[in-house]
Image (cartoon, rainbow, N blue to C red):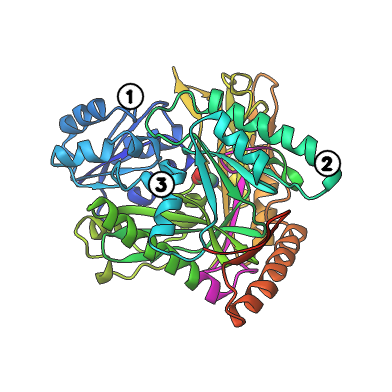
Amino acid sequence: MKILTIGNGSREHSIVESLAISNIEPVIFNIGSLINPGILELCEKSGGKVVRSDPNDPKKVVEIAESISPDFAIIGPEEPQFHGVPDALLDAGIATVGATANCSMIERSKAWMRRLMFKYKIVGRLRFKSFTSVEEAIAYINAYAESIVLKPARQSGGKGVRVISDLQEYLKKEKRAVKEKHAKYLIEKHMKPYSDIDDKILIEEKVSGTEYTLQCFSDGHSVIPTPLVQDNKPAFDGDLGPETGGMGCCSYRDTLPFITKEEVDDSLKIIKQSVDAIQKETDEKYKGIIAGQMMLTSLWGPTLIEFYSRFGDPEGVNVLPIMKTDFVEVCEAIISEKLNKIKIEFEDQATVVKAIAPRGYPDYRDLAKGHPISVDLKLLEKYGVRPYYGSIDVVNGSWITGGSRSIELFAKRDTIEEANEATERCIPAAKLLDGHQLFHRSDIGSKERLLVEADKANLAREIYLYRKEHNLIGRKVDWIPLRGKIEYKG
Ligand code: GLY
């Protein structure tokens, strides 16, 4: 069997590894813009190869795929989906695991996703307004918006989102200036490279609570969950610094220590209803991976913040290495629409994944790029920690950093704290050979951090359960000066 994989990050390294350990012993190929050393080793060992090419270019991908003639392809990142790579592969007669361009609108366009949730009355939806011009956005900010989230309307590597609390009357003017400046920046600069959706920015109601990601397999009929994972996006300890693609994640068996089984079930319901809605809207089957990036809020309980039409990165690196079911079998079940015929099982373990990135990431990628990097595999072996290589390019035999996260370290243990300790011991394994520095987050998976998340969850839970009991779930009451009480029921 031949399998073609698309994408060259840590998530794709773990996808390729899960395929490589299959009993079917497939020959694996990869297309990526960088030559990932982990993917290279696994592909070559299987008898396949890695081809450096643009994974977002459907024509180039199909050309390479046709020369390989794989039994199926699997798409790792979102951009190839947005560019129609799965559609082009399917048109060329190559079975593909990965959302089509239309289905991946659930991630590409945040306004499309929100409209869908309102149209189909899916619970856990947030009020929003979308804008195409700076003037309209600023007029709205001046007229109504209080505490808000300003977002680019398109998925753009998780960047550009700004949460602005606006509670103190004496700071209103300053807060308004910040909102206006960011709205202008998003529309005039951030969204400039993207012409594939009409909306430019979203202003969303601000909610707070603990966040988690539920990643699922979908074959167009069944939606099967994987263990719950918590990602941490700010660059530095204590949730400080700019937003990244994710600096590390933890998981704890089916759920997280601070999320209940009922909350996982309710989150899965939201994802299932959304898959049904996507299929109705697009008239296409959703065959691939879908992930809900959720928050436990006092407004709804499980609340949808964003969707991913793929595994998260690092989130996918938490779940794939502990999947007991043969991944090739899972992919085949997705393709043949028979997910209900197999049992997808995971090891009964806690996991921690920590990303290590060169200084400069995420805002100054040129600084983070071009550094020779080495990894002490003996140290990793000593602690039973596994490396998943990310933004590293093999150039003439040397490993050179790209501008993003270089490595993700994975550990599984009985508890999150133990897995955290194992990854922490292995951080020194990665070194830049020119003296430039690497950084990571030491707090992810620590006992203190888990207690903070539990506090956030308990606070939200107490209120949303009260709302539920009193039939107030999803309801919000706004007081607008000179207009009085406006009750909103989404
Ligand atoms: N970890 C967040 C993402 O995959 O976008």
Q: Residue at x 29, y 53 (%)?
A: 281
Q: Secondary structure at mark 3?
A: helix
The disc, 3 or 1, on the residue closer to the chain's N-terminal end is 1
The disc, 2 or 1, on the residue closer to the chain's N-terminal end is 1
Give percent across and percent down for residue 3: 25, 43
Q: Which residues are magenta?
A: 242-264
Name the amino acid type tagged 3.
Trp
Name the amino acid type tagged 2.
Leu
Please determine whether, in this image, residue 296 is positioned above or below residue 320.
below
Residue for badge 3? 112
Q: Which mark is residue 53?
A: 1
Q: Nearer the viewer, mark 3 or mark 2?
A: 2
Q: Residue at x 44, y 63 (%)?
A: 226
Tell which of 17 and 369 is nearer to you.
Answer: 369
Q: Which mark is residue 211?
A: none
Q: Nearer the viewer, mark 2 or mark 1?
A: 2
Q: Secondary structure at mark 2?
A: helix
Question: Does the segment drawn in magenta span residue 263?
Answer: yes
Tell which of 229 and 39 is nearer to you.
Answer: 229
Residue for badge 2? 171
Q: Secondary structure at mark 1?
A: loop
Name the amino acid type tagged 1.
Ser
The disc, 3 or 2, on the residue closer to the chain's N-terminal end is 3
Residue, far front: 482
Q: Residues within 10 Å of mark 3 (few under 14, many from 20)?
A: some
Residue, far bottom: 469
Q: CA distance from mark 3 to mark 2?
A: 33 Å
Q: Quadrant of residue 81?
A: top left
- The answer, for residue 314, to whether it is visible in the render is no
